[in-house]
């Protein structure tokens, strides 16, 4: 429902005779973006004029489900532009991704920190890309995106694994659209005569020579 949330219950055992559906809250929910779950919480979006907000319904009970609404964007009513297209959750990263249709070059990120069952910190931020984001998902610790720059579609990843370093280094070089000799379509040719290396990238470089 776009205005009511329900709970499916079945006493101790869920059977055709014990099953029951009952309303637990009355809050607007944008019907075209499916809610997602993280732990005992359900995240859902709703529209507010030209912007959207994301609400959290947390199960605060010890026995029968009892949900409490958490306004995670009470201080940011005009942050997510347009209607939410999709949300993706990564419980292992304590993260929620939100893609909206107001500006599809922006990927909104909700990050939080839990300790002993309590949320001690939380914050909203966003990634801004040079093209439009067409799809988002999580695979293990990586954000996987399909992006479109001009007429070119690309499959890209963002590795969120902490404490990872490059081979033979003490740090990890952070570079947008980074690739190496193992990347399909990448090639580097060194010419000893003039001491130059010609590098072929597996994507079209933006005009100006810098690819943000």
Image: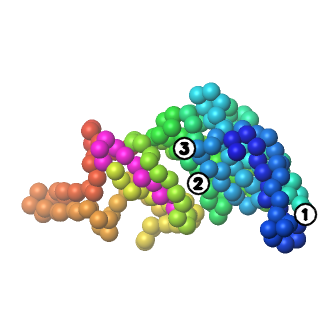
Q: Which mark is residue 63?
A: 1
Q: Residue at x 34, y 44 (%)?
A: 149
N-terminal of the two: label 2 or label 1? Answer: 1
Q: Is residue 43 left or right of residue 61?
A: left
Q: CA distance from mark 2 to mark 3?
A: 10 Å
Q: Secondary structure at mark 1?
A: loop
Name the image quarter holding residue 83: top right
Q: Residues within 10 Å of mark 2 (few under 14, many from 20)?
A: many
Q: Quadrant of the C terminus?
A: top left
Between 181 and 82, the residue placed more toward the observer is 82
Q: Residue at x 79, y 59 (%)?
A: 8
Q: Examine the rendering and report whether any part of residue 58 can be seen.
A: no
Name the image quarter holding residue 11: bottom right
Q: Is residue 158 left or right of residue 87?
A: left
Residue 161 in the image: x percent, y percent? 56, 64
Q: Which residues are magenta?
A: 142-152
Q: Is residue 151 left or right of residue 33?
A: left
- Do the residues bearing badges 1 and 3 touch, measured as CB atoms within 8 Å? no
- Residue behind mark 2: 88
Q: Residues within 10 Å of mark 1 (few under 14, many from 20)?
A: few
Q: Which mark is residue 194?
A: none
- Residue behind mark 3: 85
Q: CA distance from mark 1 to mark 3?
A: 34 Å
Q: Residue at x 32, y 65 (%)?
A: 183
Q: Residues within 10 Å of mark 3 (few under 14, many from 20)?
A: some
Residue 139 in the image: x percent, y percent? 52, 64
Name the image quarter holding residue 46: top right
| Residue at the far front in the pictured view | 17
């Amino acid at each position: 429902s776009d205005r009511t949330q329900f709970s499916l219950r079945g006493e101790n055992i869920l059977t055709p005779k014990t099953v029951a559906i009952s309303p637990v809250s009355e809050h607007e929910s944008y019907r075209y973006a499916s809610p997602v779950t993280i732990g005992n919480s359900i995240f859902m979006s709703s529209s507010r004029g030209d912007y959207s907000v994301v609400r959290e319904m947390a199960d605060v009970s010890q026995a029968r489900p009892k949900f409490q609404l958490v306004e995670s964007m009470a201080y940011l009513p005009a942050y997510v532009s347009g209607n939410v297209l999709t949300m993706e959750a990564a419980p292992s990263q304590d993260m929620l991704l939100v893609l909206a249709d107001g500006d599809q070059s922006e990927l909104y990120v909700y990050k939080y920190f839990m300790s002993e069952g309590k949320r001690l910190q939380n914050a909203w931020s966003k990634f801004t890309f040079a093209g439009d984001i067409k799809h988002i998902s999580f695979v293990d610790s990586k954000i996987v995106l399909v992006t479109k720059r001009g007429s070119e579609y690309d499959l890209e990843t963002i590795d969120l694994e902490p404490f990872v370093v490059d081979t033979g280094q003490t740090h990890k070089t952070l570079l947008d659209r980074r690739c190496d000799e193992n990347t399909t379509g990448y090639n580097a040719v060194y010419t000893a005569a003039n001491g130059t290396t010609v590098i072929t990238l597996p994507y079209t470089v933006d005009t100006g020579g810098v690819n943000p």
